[in-house]
Image (cartoon, coloured by chain):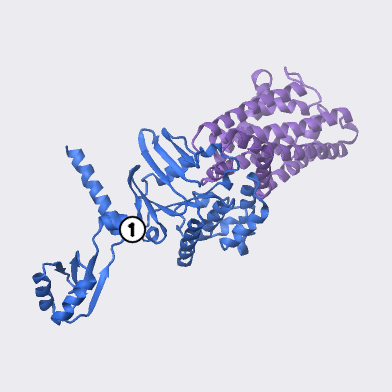
Chain colours: A purple, B blue
Amino acid sequence: MPFAPVLHAEWIKIRSLRSLLGALAAVLVATAAFSALAAADADDSDPLFSVFFGVSFGQIAAIAFGTTAVASEFRDGALRLTLAAVPDRGRWFAAKVTAIALPVLAVGLLTGFVTLLVGRAVLGTSAPGWGEGVRGAVGCGLHLTLMALFAAGLAAVLRSGVATLSVLIPFLLIVSFVVGDLSGGAADFLPDRAGQVALHSSWDGALGPWSGLAVTALWTAAALAAGGWTVRRRDA
Amino acid sequence: MTSIDVRDLTKEYGGRRAVDRLTFRVSPGRVTGFLGPNGAGKSTTFRLVLGLDRPTAGTATVGGQAYAGLRAPLRRVGALLDARAAHGSRTARDHLLALAASNRIPARRVDSVLEETGLATVARRRVRTFSLGMRQRLGIAAALLGDPEVVLLDEPANGLDPEGIVWIRTLLRRLAAEGRTVLVSSHLMGETAAFADHLLILGRGRLLADTPVQDFIRARVQPHVRIRTTDPAALGDLLARHGHDASRGEDGTWTVRHARVDDLGRLMSEEGVPVLELAAQEATLEEAYLDLTTAEAEFTAQHQEA
């Protein structure tokens, strides 16, 4: 089976669910709004992160998007109908992942640049430079995409949206915040910590902006590989 | 033509055999009813034919090919497995559009199956607002989407209103008349008798019968004649004299086995026995099925004792 029609079908599934469109809108709104609030009350220690502080909230919407898009296939026999139409499971999962990645990447990059513009307006003279700002905006788009795909892979492994969000949300809100502030060492390599280095003006851990995103990409690749393996191996 | 071929098909779930060495062929041009109690393995067999579950042993092919190897499978095989499979937040039309896109089926087919299943007026409503009967129609619309040569429907009459049941019966007859291969599971005897030409009967994962419906009924149940009269004594005497196997029910109705209405009518007329009612009782699929399952249960019991 060719790939394009399968991708087309998966895109129709995404655009026809309001909850998914809502989650994409929430990525933009949450990131920009929380960033603006934080910027208004920022000190000068890290101007770039003052602009992109809201990504911690926006990524929860991105995770909800990735999780819901996959988990909607694991309810009431939906996957059976899907796989009866597309028996090549590897191809189907690749199409699903692509149909998730493209809109999140587009919205993520838009979010990055909107947040940058808002942040610069709020911060005024203490705003980060353009070079650094564009790096942050692109990093924001990539980070949000990777987090959405990480969640998508996990949802395919766990075959449940509730289970996926019950693992990821507490992990991001509690483990990462608490352990992350202790900083240094292993915590820097957690998926969301690593990717967010790209949103900082300065860093003192082992990872820089791009190597940090690369580490998050490895986490995501591992989750997607596990998800793809599960989809291929298990009875539908 | 395209038939479904199942050979030594076996599926175990954690040591329990859901499907046990099934071998059968479903031929085109007729409706094959797939009968058996809940849990007999009908749905499992459907999933195995569609390549959704991996068989423990054996093969299932459609037109000589494994389902997973079909290009654009919806154009060859249409299936209804579970009416709840459509996402409640999607509209009926979007649900079908996504399926159609995956197999390059043009969007006008979506509108035409919506029309055919009577859902055209609710096509843009969210599926969660649908009744079970409407969801069932949507599932059938999805099965017909690719104008397939082979149609597999798992309990399609579930939740349909009487009008819907007549509709599905007519639809199944038409699909078979068009030369398609139609396999329809059910646990409702009356319904199956109304649309099926051929029967596959499953019990605890094993094939109990593979036979035309009429042959099955004739072989299992003797037809009998029902008589009511104002003079039971004369009738009883008459039947006894002619050696008929007859019995009188509590409501005064006589049942005569191994007899024909033609013979009994003439006999009663000659003897002047008054007739209130004289009717041939056709054996039903239900009786034949119960006869089969009773025999099956006795067979199993004997084997366990031995």
Residue A225 appears in the picture as rendered: yes
Q: Residue at x 50, y 46 (%)?
A: B2
A185 or A210: nearer the eye?
A: A210
Q: Where the N terminus of chain A falls, by quadrant? A: top right
Q: Residue at x 19, y 64 (%)?
A: B258
Left or right of A147? Residue B303 is left
Q: Is residue A52 above or below residue B301?
A: above
Query: Can you identify the residue that label 1 sits on?
Result: B214
Expressed as whole percent of the image width and height from the top left, the position of residue B208 reads 31, 46
Other residues around mark 1 within 10 Å, as few (<14) / some (14–19) / many (≥20): some
Parent chain of label 1: B
Q: Amino acid at mark 1?
A: Gln
Expressed as whole percent of the image width and height from the top left, the position of residue A54 reads 74, 37
Q: Residue at x 68, y 36 (%)?
A: A98
Expressed as whole percent of the image width and height from the top left, the position of residue A12 reads 67, 47
| Callout 1 secondary element | helix
Left or right of B48? Residue A42 is right
Q: Is residue A182 above or below residue A162?
A: above
Q: Quadrant of residue A66?
A: top right
Expressed as whole percent of the image width and height from the top left, the position of residue B114 reads 60, 59
Q: Quadrant of residue B56?
A: top left
Q: Is residue B238 above or below residue B302?
A: below
Extreme-right residue of the structure:
A125
Q: Number of numbered discs present?
A: 1
B181 or A21: nearer the eye?
A: B181
Left or right of B11? Residue A56 is right
B241 or B246: nearer the eye?
A: B241
Left or right of A206? Residue B171 is left
Residue A129 appears in the picture as rendered: no
